[in-house]
Image (tube, rainbow, N blue to C red):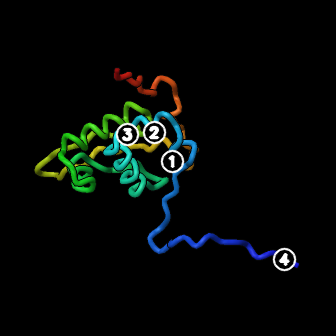
Amino acid sequence: MSRKKHRLPFDTKGGVIALGRRMLESEAYRALSLPARCLLLELQIQWRNDRPVAFGTREAAEKLRCDRRVAMKAFKELHSAGFILLEDEALFNSRTGSKARTWILTWMPYMDRPPSNDWESEKNHPVRKMHH
């Protein structure tokens, strides 16, 4: 007698985004601001294994519905905490067109290599300030 495989009833029409519990429960993730956490999700929506994520500050501000400075700060936070690595700088050219910065998401595979999980490195953990 063969057992039928149990399948969870996810809505797979647009794809499913799953985040590792280890990352979500990590101090590195919990120390992120809410805009940085939201940006992390927006970046994962754009993720593909075979290319870095092209996503700029202007697009992030639009998706997050925030000021460009807030989006810029969220990128810096994710970068300094080791969640994203800058692959290529933005290019602004009125004749040939512009291109956004490209990022590697360290919690996701890239070019068929396993995730580097740089966010787990002690050097990337923010020092929490105690308020009295």
User: How many C-alpha atoms fall within 10 Å of the one at disc 2: few (<14), some, or many (≥20)?
Assistant: many
Q: Tell me, for residue 19, which label it has, or none.
A: none
99 vs 58, nearest the viewer: 58
Query: Where does label 1 land, which residue?
Result: 108
Would you say 12 lies left or right of 101 here?
A: right
Q: Tell me, for residue 29, which label it has, or none.
A: 2
Q: Return the disc, 1 or 3, that comes first in the chain's sequence.
A: 3
C-alpha distance separating marks 2 and 4: 42 Å
What is the secondary structure assignment of the residue under circle 2? helix
Q: Return the disc, 4 or 1, that comes first in the chain's sequence.
A: 4
* Residue at left offset 27%, top offset 53%: 64
85 vs 18, nearest the viewer: 18
Question: Which residue in the rendered view is the most extreme toward the bottom?
Answer: 1
* Residue at left offset 44%, top offset 70%: 14
C-alpha distance separating marks 2 and 3: 21 Å
Q: Tell me, for residue 2, which label it has, or none.
A: 4
Q: Return the disc, 2 or 4, that comes first in the chain's sequence.
A: 4
What is the secondary structure assignment of the residue under circle 3? strand
